[in-house]
Image (spheres, grey):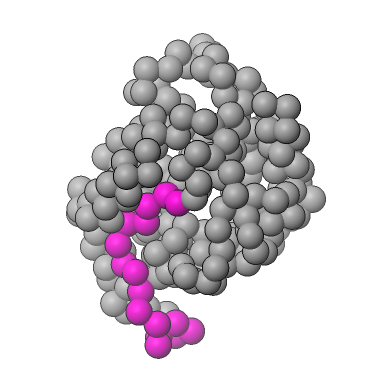
Amino acid sequence: MLKQALQLHEKVVSCRRCPRLVAHRETVAATKVRRFQNEEYWGKPVHGFGDPQAQLLIVGLAPGAHGSNRTGRAFTGDRSGELLYQVLYDNAFCTQASSVQKDDGLYLTNCYITAVVRCAPPENKPLPEEFALCRPYLIEEISLLRFVHVVVVLGKLAFDHYFKACQDVGYSVPSPKPQFSHGAVVRLPWGVTLISSYHPSQQNTQTGKLTYSMFNDVFATARSLLSRA
């Protein structure tokens, strides 16, 4: 299983399926922003990471242009990651409360993090065809992560495209499909419990749409469900 995960990581990192995303991620990596001018950007697709035997799967949207597109690890080095890793740490899903670079000592515990798109998109808005071209990687992860009991989706787009990937895996998606709502908990026919959350983006946290307490409740619920699994 670990070997298969590493092979998948290599496939993701070498991917050039979406010309618009390739151009954007590489342009951002070359031009940088002032505060990171002295750093070398990753500038490639960002693969999922974590425990291959994880019971908790977290699905985000896409890398941040100056976050994981710079560091090479999901939710590392930006404001979204600040909240996510603090909450994961507070619920015993990772080894430290912050993550600023790929080799900073953070490890996930019984948890795996991935996204529905693996390259930083312009304006953080992937196109429909880019979601579709990237979906096989999520499908492969869903198939590989055989011990997952709880899935947390971060935002409505991650919610929608997680269901599309599950349908492609061959799971019987409920009809009508469950509605996205922050904090909603749904037991799915294939034995996974899905928890929906607003994305921990800077826009959501600065406006108060998502607070620490709201986000912590999501992962406290995940922890509680796993303790009964």
Which residue sits at x=53%, y=32%? 148
Query: Residue 50, relative to residue 75: is it above or below?
Result: above
Q: Nearer the viewer, residue 123 or 89?
A: 89
Q: Tell me residue 183's x, y (percent).
A: 71, 35
Q: Tell me residue 137's x, y (percent).
A: 32, 40
Q: Nearer the viewer, residue 198 or 162?
A: 162
Query: Residue 68, relative to residue 191: is it above or below?
Result: below
- Point out the stretch of residues depicted in magenta: 34-49
Residue 227 in the figure: left or right of residue 59: right
**Residue 90 included in the magenta stretch of the image:** no
Q: Can see residue 203?
A: no
Q: Nearer the viewer, residue 183 or 216?
A: 216
Dividing the picture into quarters, in which one does residue 201 lie? bottom right
Which residue sits at x=24%, y=48%? 11
Residue 83 in the figure: left or right of residue 115: right
Q: Find the residue positioned furthest to the bottom.
A: 38
- Quarter of the picture holding the N terminus: top left
Figure disc tally: 0
